[in-house]
Amino acid sequence: MAGELNPVKVAAQNRKARYNYTIEERLEVGIVLNGSEVKSLREGRATISESYATEQSNELFLINSYIPEYKQAGQFNHEPRRPRKLLLQRRQIGKLIGAIQREGMTLVPLKLYFNDRGMAKLELGLAKGKRLYDKRQSEKKKDWSRQKARLMRDKG
């Protein structure tokens, strides 16, 4: 049908990131993958919850992400926890490296997905770690908004 949009297929999501970090900025980056990694991602079995992005020789790499081996690839399979290069413009890389080194921020992967063109993309968040009292505060806010919604629903 004309005008119908292809939905974005999410391969992996990091739900803990919003709880453990305050996300200052989000950006979409490309990721370098092997053929067997793409096939495995399409099955949706990847994990990015304990991964992070770091700088190595003026490039950004995704460390500790888990993409399981693709069974049908045989001898041409990939290593499940290998570092994967992230694709950004040189200016963006410089800005992010500066934020990591000067301001003590962290690059946290939020979502690994396929865009409407079928390309694997990573949503990366420039984040600052939350302290325990910040987590408690956000939990209180969430509970109160749930309670408020419940009260409004019961009243009217």
Image: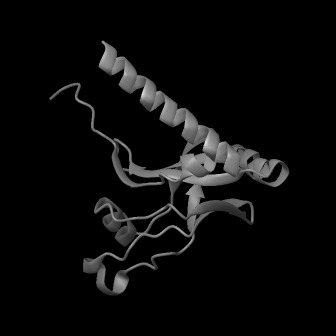
Find residue 11 and report its horizontal and vertical position in percent: 36, 55
Going by the image, does 38 lie left or right of 58?
left
Quarter the C terminus occupies: top left
Q: Is residue 28 above or below residue 42?
A: above
Q: Is residue 120 visible?
A: no
Q: Residue 11 or 129: which is nearer the viewer?
A: 129
At 85% from the left and 50% from the top, the residue drawn is: 102
Quadrant in the picture for the N terminus: top left
Which residue is pictured at 62% across the width and 46% down the height? Answer: 135
Hey, which residue is sitting farthest top in the picture?
Answer: 156
Q: Position of residue 120 (x, y in %)?
A: 42, 53
Any part of residue 34 in sight: yes
Residue 15 horizontal/vertical position (percent): 47, 51
Q: Nearer the viewer, residue 23 or 11?
A: 23
Residue appearing at x 32%, y 20% in the figure: 153
Give the residue drawn at x 31%, y 20%. 154
Q: For this view, does 66 lie left or right of residue 26?
A: left
Residue 71's image quarter? bottom left
Residue farthest to the left, as pictured: 1
Residue 124 in the figure: left or right of residue 70? right
Return the residue nearer the eye: 13 or 142: 142
Determine whether 51 is above or below 133 in the image: below
Is 58 situated left or right of 148 in this image?
right
**Can you name the residue that lies furthest to the bottom here?**
75
x%, y% of residue 97? 75, 52
Q: How many marks?
A: 0
| Direction right: furthest residue | 102
Q: Is the image coloured rainbow, by chain, by secondary structure, or in one colour?
A: one colour
